[in-house]
Amino acid sequence: MTTVQAARDAKVKVCSLGELERDRVRVVSAEGRIIAVFIDQGKAYAVDNRCPHMGFPLHRGTVKDGILTCHWHHAKFDLAGGCTFDPFADDVTSFYVEVRDGTVWLDPRPIEEERRAHWLRKLDEGLEHDIRLVLAKSVIGLDELGETTDILRKAALFGVRNRAAGWGTGLSIITAMANVLPSLDKGDRPLALYHGLVHVARSTAGQPPNFDLEPLETGETRPERYVDWFRRFIEVRAEDAAERTLRTAIRIGLPPKAVADMIFAACTDHLFLDVGHSLDFANKAFELLDSIGWENAEEVLPSLIPNMVWAQRMEETSSWRHPVDLATLLWEVYEELDAAIDEGGGALKGWDGHEEVAQTILDAEPRETLAVMRDVVRQGVPLTELSASVAYAAARRPVHFHVSNEFADWDTVHHTFTYANAVDQAMRRAPSKLLARGIFDGAMSVYLERFLNVPKQPAPTPSGDMPGWEEILASFDGQGRVDETAQLVADALAGGKRDDVVRTLGHALLREDSGFHQFQIYEAGLKQYRQFAGRPAGDLILIGVARFLTAHYPTVRATGQTFDIAARLHRGESLHGEDV
């Protein structure tokens, strides 16, 4: 441990040595701190009087053989340095104390490790042992130092190194939260990162670690060869071969676009792979690298392979083959897609037919929908405009989702929307003819959900009221208030309070014990809202997000409680009244 060295200045008088030996502990208030001074075997020690675990007054604890034990949760500390024997408790701050001429004197400045190194070490401990309070403290400390990138990098590398099963939902959550940080209230931003860390730790807990394979030693440098190899090995479920191919492509320096082409092509070689998770995870992995740097690609991207290799391929399922053989219809379109893309060239600028195409996707039969989409490509509509249209159509399903449906079907509409968003984001990052297949897959998944909008829940009509954020948040406090929340959000949007709605929905997300799907839909909804902001489509996307979130709340809200405890301890507040 590297400590900050400062000249010792024990200037605060505590008591006489005799008084300390008689009482065994004295509590001193100095420079805004409450400090407990103990004596053990003739030597004086000083530590912060608040137990770092839950703030219980340590002067009520027990000292024996150099060990200070807190009586609340039995956390044990080395009295000489403040380090804990029990990682769940965190270390207690210690202070320099000396005896001069029979009097005990205290330096009220902490003996502390350099702050950044301290919090990074604590972040490691929190992730390794899945200790939420330690994670919360480390996030608060690092955020205060402006070290958001360090948080993300630590979480990313821990997540991929300690889960042999590959990319987990925790990594998607922390990436999603990093993406939305600028849209959140400043006070909610460290809480968003904390949620991500909690889920990274949870998704790796009890998992075997990952062991990397070495790249090939080869002179092959052609990007197209690596695309071909990678797709071939994913096709035949050859996990090790796919990993060595991907690692080699990155190690020899293929550009990010070429590597993205490899992965996105393999994700769309089969229909709606793993109900959309495979492509969504891949898109998130590249977004994570945007935050922590491409130099981490060789560690991060291979974590996608286990899911890609073993994922369910939707053409193997009954719902995609019967009563309508969607797989065959899609394969027929794919045979014409390259020529359609070449013919149109994406040259049509200023196209604004999203609403019309989305309505076709929502209401028409599959053959008609696919023909319309193919034709707009031929007409020169950019593929990113078509991918946005499909994402908008998918976003409409939760808007019109009727609560008479089975509750689990919220996840059905969610999967399609987050997949369509991933296709759209990937298309903007690394457009390709192969990836364009995913746009059509997404449209067919929207089709399969048509009965979840029967009866069709009408979109709320603005009432003219102007709700405040407190009123919107209050609608999340009772189960089943889906349409009440939708109405309040619609009124706020109609009143021009769009940024307030985004922040309020973010706060609602973060104060709950939210799960993977809630984080996904908020972030995806925000991405798609930004593309349609200021238009009715953008407002409908946020209404759909609000309805989905409300359907899953309230929860116990234990995650936020732990974070609040950590924040209060960090600020030096007493958690247990004045008796300290």
Image (tube, rainbow, N blue to C red):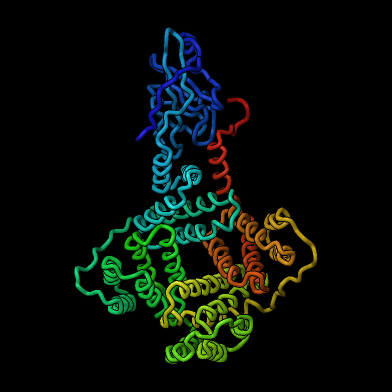
- Please give left or right for residue 231 compared with residue 287 in the image: left
- Please give left or right for residue 209 compared with residue 336 in the image: left
Between 152 and 560, the residue placed more toward the observer is: 152
Residue 264 versus residue 555 in the image, above or below:
below
Position of residue 8 measured from the top left corner of the image (x, y, whole percent): 41, 22
Position of residue 36 measured from the top left corner of the image (x, y, whole percent): 50, 22
Q: Residue at x 57, y 63 (%)?
A: 522
Give the farthest residue toward the right.
464
Residue 319 versus residue 214 in the image, above or below:
below
Position of residue 49 measured from the top left corner of the image (x, y, whole percent): 51, 27
Quick one: quadrant of the N terminus? top left
Residue 554 visible in the picture: yes
Quadrant of residue 563 within the rendered picture? top right
Q: Residue at x 19, y 68 (%)?
A: 217
Q: Residue at x 50, y 50 (%)?
A: 194
Between 183 and 72, the residue placed more toward the observer is: 183
Quadrant of residue 395 within the rendered picture? bottom right
